[in-house]
Amino acid sequence: MPDGSNGNGNGNGNGNATSLSVEPRHDWTLEQAEALFALPFTDLIYGAQRVHRAWHQPNTVQMSTLLSIKTGGCPEDCAYCPQSVRYHTGVDSDALMSLPDVLERARAARAAGATRFCMGAAYRSPKRKELEKIALMVREVRALGLETCATLGMLSRDQARELKDAGLDYYNHNLDSSEQFYGQIISTRSYQDRLDTLAAVRDAGMNVCCGGIVGMGETARDRAQMLVTLANLPQQPESVPINQLVRVAGTPLAQAGDVDPLDFVRTIAAARVMIPKAHVRLSAGRSTMSDELQALAFLAGANSIFYGEKLLTTGNPDVEQDRALLARLGIRAEAAAAVPGGT
Ligand code: SAM
Ligand code: DTB
Ligand code: SF4
C-alpha cells in the first residue's frame, strides 16, 4: 500500500494509525473511540507513538509520590476502595496527619527523586477546618520545590480557589469509568457531581488530573466512553491516571476477574491518542505487572508513574526496583516544572 494506509480505514479518520490526528480533538464520538480500541494492536501502538513523540520528550517519565494524609473511614461506597467505612478491609480510620509528619515524607520523596507530591484524603469532601490545615500543607510542600497535587473528594468553587491560592498545582479527581457503568460502582454520589468538581478545579485555574480504573467488570465500550468524556471536556486534563484495579479483600470487587494485559495497554494507548498533550500515568496495579507489561505501557504512551513503595493503602514497587526498570529501558526522570525553590 504505497500511501502508507493499513487498510483499516473506516472513513472517520480513526481507523488508520497513520491518519490519527496528533492535535487534541474535542469532538470524539463513541464509535470513533471504539474503532481506535479495536485497531490491530501494533497499529494502535504505532499511532500512540506518533502522537506521543509529537508532544512529549520520548524516554522520560514524570514521577509523583503519593501520601495518604487521612486514611480510612470514608462514608462513600466506591466498590473498589479499601478506605470505605462500609467494607471490612482491615484499613483503620486515622486522623489527618500533622504538618511536620507530612513535610518529613515530602522531603524524603524529593530526596528519592520525585518531582510531584500528591496528598490523598479519604473524604467525600473536605470540611472547612480540614481544608485550612491542608492548604497549609500545600504551601509548605511547595516551598520545598515540589509540585503539589491533592485528592480530597468533591470540592466547591470556593474550596477550589482556596487550594489554588495556597499553591496547589494539580487536583486529582477521577471519573473512574463511563457514566453508564459508574452507577454499578458508586451510589453515594453522581457522575455529574464528579464533573462539577472538575469544572470548579478548572475554573480556579488548577491543572486537572483525571482518569479511571480498568478491571472492575466494565466493557471496552465503557473504557472508550470514559476517554470520550475526558477528551471532549472544554479543556482536556493535563494528567490522566490509568489505574488497574487493586483487588482488596473485603471490598465488593475483591473477586473481580483478571484484565487482559493487552486490553490494559490498549486503554493507555487510546488515552495517549485521545488526550495527546496529557501525561498519561501508569498508576495503581504496577506491583502485579511484569517489567515487560510496564515496558509495553510506556511504549503505548504512558509517561508518568507513582514512585515510592506505597500508593495510599496498598503496595507499589519499591524505589530500587523502579530505578532498575527505568535503567533497563533507558528511561529517565522528567525534570520538575519550575516551582519556586525552598529549603
Ligand atoms: N476520596 C477521594 C476521591 O475518591 O476522590 C480521593 C482518594 S481516592 C482513593 C482516589 C482514587 O483512587 C479513586 O478515584 C480511584 O480511581 C483510585 N482507587 C481507589 N481504590 C483503588 C483500587 N483498589 N484500585 C485502583 N484504583 C483505586
Ligand atoms: C489515582 O488515580 N490513583 C491513586 C491516586 N489517583 C490517588 C490512588 C490509587 C489507590 C490504590 C488503592 C490504595 O492504595 O488504597
Ligand atoms: Fe472514599 Fe475516595 Fe475511597 Fe470513594 S475512592 S470510598 S470517596 S476514599
Image (cartoon, grey):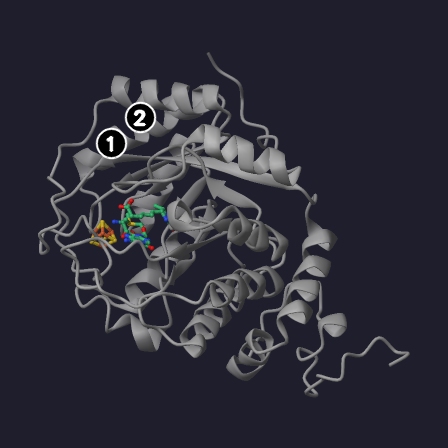
Q: Which residue is at a point 44% across and 25% down the rendered structure image?
A: 142
Q: What whole-number distance in Å separates the C-alpha atoms at marks 2 and 1? A: 7 Å
Q: Give the residue at mark 2.
A: 136
Q: Which residue is at a point 54% across and 62% down the rendered structure image?
A: 271
Left or right of residue 178, residue 279 in this image: right
Specify the quadrant that holds the N terminus.
bottom right
Disc 1: residue Cβ within 8 A of ligand 1's nearest atom: no
For label 2, the crowd category at 10 Å Cα-Cα, with few meaning under 14, some 14 to 19 and many 20 or more, is: some
Q: Position of residue 185 (x, y in %)?
A: 24, 68
For label 1, the crowd category at 10 Å Cα-Cα, with few meaning under 14, some 14 to 19 and many 20 or more, is: some
Depth check: give the residue in front, 96 or 10. Answer: 10
Amino acid identity at mark 2: Leu
- Residue 249 found in image quarter: bottom left
Whether residue 23 is visible to the viewer of this picture, yes or no, is no
Amino acid identity at mark 1: Glu
Depth check: give the residue in front, 189 or 14. Answer: 14
Give the secondary structure at mark 2: helix
Give the secondary structure at mark 1: helix
- Residue 79 found in image quarter: bottom left
Rendered view: 260 above or below 14: above
Q: Which residue is at a point 40% across and 19% down the rendered structure image?
A: 107
Q: Position of residue 264 (x, y in %)?
A: 47, 63
Rendered view: 214 above or below 168: below
Depth check: give the residue in front, 180 or 5. Answer: 5
Q: Give the residue at mark 1.
A: 132
Marks 2 and 1 in Cβ contact (< 8 Å): yes
Q: Which residue is at a point 76% across and 79% down the rendered structure image?
A: 6
Rendered view: 13 above or below 50: below
Q: Position of residue 204 (x, y in %)?
A: 43, 47
Left or right of residue 8, residue 164 in this image: left
